[in-house]
Amino acid sequence: MEQSKERELSWLRTIAGELATLTITRLDETLPWYGDMPPGRRSAVGLVAQTGISSFIQWYDDPSATPWIASDVFSSAPRELLRSISLQETLQLIRVVVSVVEERVAPRSEELREAILHYSRDVAFAAADVYARAAEARGLWDARLEALVVDSILTGESDDELPSRIAALGWHGTGEATVLVGTSERTVDVDQIRRTARHAGADVLVGLQGTRLVLVLGRVELEPKEPGGTVPEPIPFIEIAGRLAEFFSDGPLVLGPKVENLVAASRSARAALAGIAVAKSWRAATRPVDADELLPERALAGDGLARRTLIEQIYEPLSQQSGELMETLWCYLDNGRSLEATARELFVHPNTVRYRLKKVSEIIGWNATGAREALILQAALIVGSIAQHGRRKAPSKK
């Protein structure tokens, strides 16, 4: 028996080079992706195939060495090879190697045929183990990198490396971005969050910091539902935030203003964090609520970004118009939003007040006739007046 095995081993070592050549030829003939690879990677794949043949011979000599010999097949593969070919392609590679060896070796004896079957099974399990470990390591690395990117966005301490880190995470966002902040349990289903965002036409970065859950949302490029059809309209971020609200615990949920891209998302994050701090002070706040709807509360709490937003989006645009619009708005708000009282103070007809308020709404986008928006506008007038003059100037009377 021993002499027979020695003869088989001797014969296998003699044809090892022939098997390697046949395997490379078969790979070229049957696997299109192999032929498309750069020469360096083709060489690495060929090395893995040759190692598999050599390892089979070693295993046949000592079957008890199965665990380490089967795993050793992939030890010669450089890391970039494992990243460039999938598990499916690796199994195709194993199948080609096994079929070549089986065609050449199996007819010699039934013992060799069974040995090939046992060894091919062990190598397949070894391949799955290699890719599982690589996926686990990549998952841990991605989680750490994602946490680092979200933290950089929250703190505003972005640097020149932020775009490359975002790209390394496989970010698919191509345009506007925003930040959604709330609280959540540590057991939140992150994968389900990603699926929900993806179905809404957004990519997402997830940051769980204690009980605070931060979602950085970015739009993805939408495609027509049917070939040649029209591209669907993007879903507003506030609606996307509403779909994601179920993943947050009860309590305030604030959406920062949209910015031009992910790199600029720190501005949205600052607004959202400032909004979370004061959201409970607005009894009728919706959930989620836009951070800009909380501008008065944020400004009173000392948020410099809120004060600048009030000045840049409301006070300055009105200052650039005729003085009668600013004067009318002041009077209207000071008189408790009464058209008649404002008209009497300005010595104009109530319809003139209505017309001027309509012009104000067209210029700044806020309507002074609504209670909440009136509060935002009054806060903007006060903050802007303090910034420009140091004290409020009383409107002149006609």
Image (cartoon, helix red, strand yellow):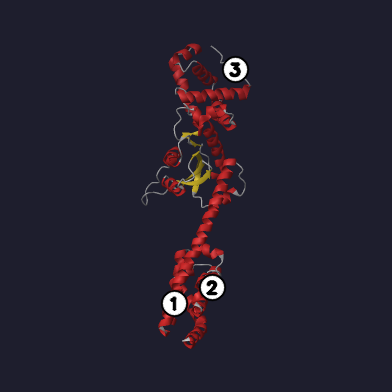
> Which residue bears the numbered disc 1?
116
Q: Residue at x 50, y 42 (%)?
A: 213
Give the image location of residue 172, x and y in percent: 49, 50
Q: Residue at x 52, y 44 (%)?
A: 208
In-front residue for pair 244/61: 61
**Numbered marks: total:** 3
Q: Which disc is residue 47 wearing?
A: 2
> Depth-wise, is mark 3 or mark 1 nearer the camera?
1
Label 2 crowd (10 A; few <14 / some 14-19 / many >=20): some
Query: Mark 2: which amino acid?
Result: Leu
Give the image location of residue 254, x and y in percent: 49, 36
Sequence-first disc among 1 and 2: 2
> Depth-wise, is mark 2 or mark 3 nearer the camera?
2
Q: Which disc is residue 393 wearing?
A: 3
Sequence-first disc among 3 and 1: 1
Sequence-first disc among 2 and 3: 2
Give the image location of residue 125, x and y in percent: 46, 67
Give the Cα separation between the discs numbered 1 and 2.
19 Å
Query: Mark 1: which amino acid?
Result: Ile
In-front residue for pair 59/198: 59
In-front residue for pair 84/65: 65
Picture quadrant where residue 244 is located: top left
Label 3 crowd (10 A; few <14 / some 14-19 / many >=20): few
Under circle 2, the secondary element is: helix
Give the Cα separation between the discs numbered 2 and 3.
83 Å
Query: Mark 3: which amino acid?
Result: Lys
Give the image location of residue 273, x and y in percent: 54, 36
Taking the image as drawn, is residue 393 in sight?
yes
Q: Which disc is residue 31 wearing?
A: none
Taking the image as drawn, is residue 29 in sight?
no
Residues tagged 3 and 1 counted as in contact (Cβ below 8 A): no
Up-down: is 175 above or below 128? above
